[in-house]
Image (spheres, grey):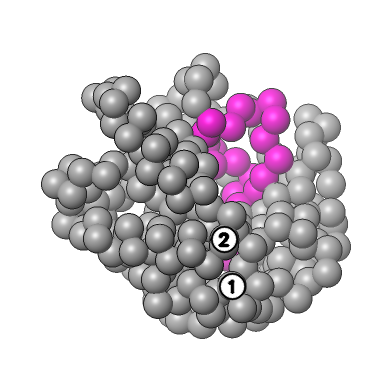
Amino acid sequence: MRDSSNRLIDYLRISVTDRCNLRCTYCMPPEGVEKKRHDQLLSLEDLALAARAAASLGVRKIRLTGGEPLVRHGIVHLVSLISAIPAITSLGMTTNGTLLAPLAADLKAAGLMSINISLDTLDPERYRELTRGGDIRQAIAGVETAAALGFPLKLNMVVFPETSPDEIASMRRFADNLGARLQRIAAYTLVDEKQDGHGMERPPRCATCNRIRLTSDGMLRPCLRSSLEVRFDPAHPEESIREAVLAKPPCGGLCDDRTIAQIGG
């Protein structure tokens, strides 16, 4: 599929839940977000249907996100449903890692191919501050378990103005020792205009963006930095996805109707 700017769209990010067990300062307000009822969320079968429809239109890469995807009941089953789609050549997950250690082996057996783990610091107190109470030991256990199982692994580090070069270097050494890659993410908010000249690995430049997103409550988002969305229709899945792709703007602006946790980053 190509969008109106002739970009090849071959990547679908699926947010499986708006819930999270952490309250990261850059992701959601201290009180969290208003939780959707179970009947407001797409079923696992509808999420898999969206993946199959996207694959039929040329999507080859799918990433499961949240909120925190590992709080979604049935997440291992969903991985198995999507991994069974022959056209999908890359199936990954982005997680904060705190719930990963006991689930990692089952996720791998179900067909998960890679994992990105959000980890912005190795300092326990700084981690508690950024996550509003998280325990870094749980995140490290998730990282180490995923590495031991042989998952291709990236560590997503949000870089703030106050982040020191030494902290980045420490994270890079930690990643290298595990055979993982460090992915630096420039700190941003959705209500500020998109800036491409940040010099880090993420967010991607608009000119090369190849992705659309599906929220857990069934809205296709052509662009993270836009409030535009298209209702995913399980009765006409391919048509919904085509509409979202063609609605993708040439460049992101700002989004003022959802938090990052509600879209999936």
Q: Residue furthest left?
A: 125
The total of numbered circles placed on residues is: 2
Disc 1/disc 2 C-alpha distance (Å)? 8 Å
Q: Residue 142: image x %, image y %?
A: 38, 64
- Label 2 CA crowd tier, 10 Å (few <14, some 14–19, many 20+): many
* Viewer-nearest residue: 212 or 191: 212
Residue designated by label 1: 108
Please name the residue shown 64% across and 63% down the image.
113
Please name the residue shown 41% across and 36% down the image.
172
| As drawn, 60 above or below 82 | above
* Left or right position of 171 against 16: left
Q: Residue 29: image x %, image y %?
A: 25, 49
Q: Is residue 209 magenta?
A: yes
Q: Is residue 185 magenta?
A: no
Query: What residue span does the magenta drawing correspond to?
Result: 201-227
Q: Residue 173: image x %, image y %?
A: 39, 37
Mark 1–mark 2 CB contact (< 8 Å):
yes
